[in-house]
Amino acid sequence: MDTRTIRSSLIILFIIVSCSGPHSNRDSIREISLAGPDTSLKSSTLPVPPLLRDLSQDKKRAQYELVVQRGSTEFFSGTSAATYGYNGNILGPTLRAKRGQEVIIRVRNRLREYTTVHWHGMLVPGNMDGGPHQVIPPDGEWRVRFRVSQPAATLWYHPHGLGTTAVQVYRGLAGLFIIDDSISDRLPIPSEYGKNDIPLIIQDRRFSSDGVPLYLTGMRDIMEGMKGETILVNGVIKPFLRVSATRYRFRILNGSNARVFDFKLSTGGTFYQIAADSGFLHRPHLTRSIRLSPGERAEILVDFSSFKEGDTLRLVSDYFTILEMRVGAKSSDPTSIPATLAPRASLPLSAVRRTRVFHLEGMGHMVSINRKQMDINRIDEYVKKGDTEIWTITSSTRGMMGMGMMRGTGGIVHNFHAHGIHFLILDRNGTPAGPGEQGWKDTVLLDEGERVRVITRFLYRGIFMYHCHILEHEDNGMMGQFKVD
Ligand code: C2O
Ligand code: CU
Ligand code: CU
């Protein structure tokens, strides 16, 4: 048997096994749990990624230095694991720039393998995007220069090498990139970074019994993408945050490889969503939950003022505790929630020049977009700078064998992310986008069989990726390239 035949046999075996029980999905997650002494683990204070020092003397510019390096991290005390980080052992510092500023970044690669640094959500020319074409060899360096020309948002950066994105992100490479503008500067919402404006990089990992992260240990990981049973927030397990009984803003990034989170408060209470991936919503959206797939971000406001000193709340998702919040004393709170946050984002339907369809399909190694797998020497779509288009995205996990065998496997979803553009969701299965999806987006989740239409405009020239942000799917070829001329 060649490897393809073996692979197909394994896939079929997997389907049989995973369809054999009504709750097979949950049960097998428990079964394969190899987590270390998670329950006995003491919680630790939530670390906040430091703001990277801006080396520029000139207000018109922000100048940063990033070193991609090897390090080690003690996820469980007493055992250290090999990790990767930017300027440190794991994750990276937060970069920050203002709309209109020029950003200069020197990236040095001190790994023993090549990497790239992609600015996820940043509108930049193709050659500054950090996708698979901007390879930085070991000991190499990449000089980045672009002007920020987009609204305030919480973006992020991560590696994007061809076939190596998933494993390098899993090793620890990810950081935030915050954009400010004159609108965000004037909002009365919490905005003291690390004090009442708290970034949360949320990821899941699987640990061996001796506390070392494990990668791709089972068939399910290959089919669905790598999901772990232990949650990391800003790189640590079981964190807690002391909050005063005031309003807080959380900038949430789902930085996991494959897991979709449904964030809720343990009280079942409400909170406001104020931003989607690439910018503020027009109005704060009162909700009890937020669903984020890998790569997506949301900003939320949580008001602790009705809680007593000593109360504890948790941010949860399914059966996971993400973050414990310990309420302290009341203090005066100068912040408020404005009726409107930013102008309503819109693009004129009348300007639409054409429509394209992107069909996401398959699982495991059989993933594809429009029945094709990534070929770095092939451009899949040619578009014109300045044009407005509608992109229709559809998703199916069953298509690979054309027999609808995938029903009941549950855990496989796809999402769609594109570089170099922002988009607005027109509708989902014919129904207008929900209030939490009405701002600028760059990544959108699709459930099995869903159809999402987005409108976008191309502002920068170059070659850009579109792909599923389930990182194992991306690395298995669920990616294509569009060229803007
Ligand atoms: Cu977050 Cu193409 O990436
Ligand atoms: Cu991206
Ligand atoms: Cu996918």
Image (cartoon, rainbow, N blue to C red):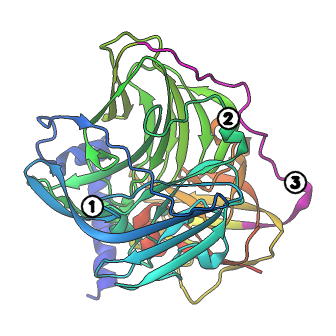
Q: Position of residue 79 (x, y in %)?
A: 9, 55
Q: Evaluate whether residue 184 shows in this view.
A: yes
For label 1, the crowd category at 10 Å Cα-Cα, with few meaning under 14, some 14 to 19 and many 20 or more, is many
Task: Say if mark 1 contacts mark 2, CB within 8 Å.
Answer: no
Badge 2 or badge 3: first in the primary sequence: 3
Residue 182 belongs to the span the image colors magenta:
no
Q: Nearer the viewer, residue 272 or 93?
A: 93
Q: Position of residue 148 (x, y in %)?
A: 67, 61
Q: Which residue is mark 1?
A: 89
Which mark is nearer the camera, 1 or 3? Answer: 1
Q: Residue at x 54, y 65 (%)?
A: 63
The residue lying toward the viewer, choosing from 196 and 452, is 196
Q: Which residues are magenta?
A: 330-356
Q: Is mark 2 within 8 Å of ligand 1?
A: no
All told, the count of numbered labels is 3
Looking at numbered disc 2 in the image, what kind of residue is underneath it? Pro
* Residue indicated by mark 3: 349
**x 61%, y 44%: residue:** 276
Q: Nearer the viewer, mark 1 or mark 2?
A: 1
What is the secondary structure assignment of the residue under circle 3?
Answer: helix
